[in-house]
Image (cartoon, grey):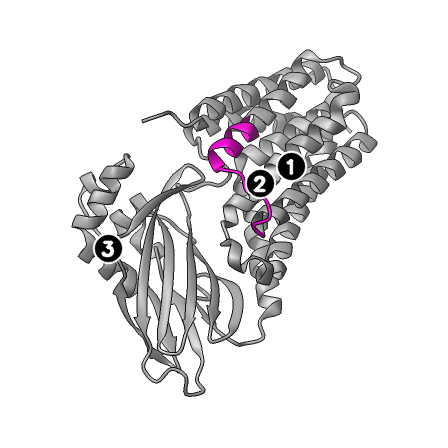
Amino acid sequence: MSRWRRLSSFVLAVLVVGVPAGLARPAPAAAHDATTTAQAQVTGSGASVRAVLDLEYDLLMKSAWLYAEAYEAKERAEQLRQLRINRDAVNDYVTRRFEVAYDGKPCVPTQAGDADVRPRDQVAFAVITLSYTCAGAGGGGAYAISSALFPDSETFVHSTKTMVTYELGGERGSAVLTAPSPTVRVGEDRAASQIGEFFLLGAEHLLFGLDHVLFLLALLIGARRLRDVVVTASAFTAAHSITFLLAAMGIVQAPGAVVEPIIAGSIVVVALANLLGREEDRLGRWRLPVVFAFGLVHGLGFAGALDIDESGSWGLLLSLLSFNAGIEVTQLVLVAVLFPLLVLLRRTAAARWGVVALSVPIVAVSLYWFFDRIPLPL
């Protein structure tokens, strides 16, 4: 048993050192400095196809090999100006990396109108709209969509994913394109692939979304018994599953500028309860209502990661359920790993120190996020 206690103490030390590292990465629900997820909505029929791409602004400008004044622009007005004056370079990069084809022949792209900029997870995304002309479309062939956006070889990011939703020639579906699997062929029976792609996307979103992980850790620190863990995790799961599905299908809406600060605030509340509450039950009878309420908000944050257009959401129910399943399974794995270690720590002389040493950094990081995420008037 002493060996396991030493191991749990080591893991505690790693967590205490690692949590403050989040201050250097005040991203919301997902990390953007090492990898990225591009989004594409492709619609059309016959020879006319339209693609709307959401691409991280600074990454796009770097990948198009533009000057620092372009990719370092922070204000929306300046970002729009840079997109206008660098229209040709941006268009050349995007059309070389993103392709729509019909019956094996590439469709001819042109940029439709000026690019736009919008925030997602507090990161500026350039919205590029392309019009494609597909020769011979309507003659019994099939569409295909391919993405090689932001490859590892450019060295700016790695493991880029392009999440595609499409409605082409009467076929509707979704796919996650990666370097090993860069193409989706419209009309193919790919339910199994779709489930796996969105399951992994959900798992990665939770695992690399430091704020969701910290909230889960704060809940576990305050849980004294296995029953507390089961009940608390069930309440959190039920709550965020409800709002995730409702928001992703466009039934409810909440702006990220409101959701993201509340997510950070939820971590502060639970971590402070661990520090200031009674040893036996730090949230007392309010535990389940508080966890359920905050779970509803976290579900909105999960939905924001997909950012699926309302008009196509019902047709993407399989993708949404798979994404949510990835979140749930990863959450269960984290609970299964962390809670036994915390139980072992409570049996050591470092038990009281452990609660403080874990909770204080969580509070500090979450407070930083809270104020960082509050939008300031321009």
- Residue bearing the label numbered 3: 90
Q: CA distance from mark 2 to mark 3?
A: 32 Å
Name the residue nearer the viewer: 147 or 17.
Answer: 147
Q: Secondary structure at mark 2?
A: helix
Task: Work out whether 285 lies above or below 181.
Answer: above
Which quarter shows the C terminus? top left
Name the residue nearer the viewer: 333 or 219.
Answer: 219
Which amino acid, by three-letter code, is at mark 1?
Leu
- Observer able to see residue 175: yes
How far from the left and from the top, in percent, is residue 371?
45, 22
Q: Secondary structure at mark 3?
A: helix
> Which numbered circle lies on residue 35?
none
Which amino acid, by three-letter code, is at mark 3?
Val
Residue name at image x 54 percent, y 76 percent: 188
Which region is colored magenta? 249-264
Is residue 72 shown left or right of residue 312? left
How far from the left and from the top, in percent, is residue 10?
62, 27
Which quarter shows the N terminus? top right
Q: Between label 2 and label 3, give the one nearer the viewer.
A: 2
- Residue bearing the label numbered 1: 296
Q: CA distance from mark 3 to mark 1?
A: 39 Å
How far from the left and from the top, in percent, is residue 65?
21, 51
How far from the left and from the top, in percent, is residue 110?
25, 66
**Do the CB atoms of the residues marked 2 and 1 lie less than 8 Å apart?**
yes
Q: Residues within 10 Å of mark 3 (few under 14, many from 20)?
A: many
**Picture quadrant where residue 124 is located:** top left
**Picture quadrant where residue 45 is located:** bottom left
Label whose residue precedes the other's in the sequence (2 or 3): 3
Name the residue nearer the viewer: 360 or 43.
Answer: 43
- Residue bearing the label numbered 2: 300
Residue name at image x 62 percent, y 21 percent: 269
Q: Secondary structure at mark 1?
A: helix
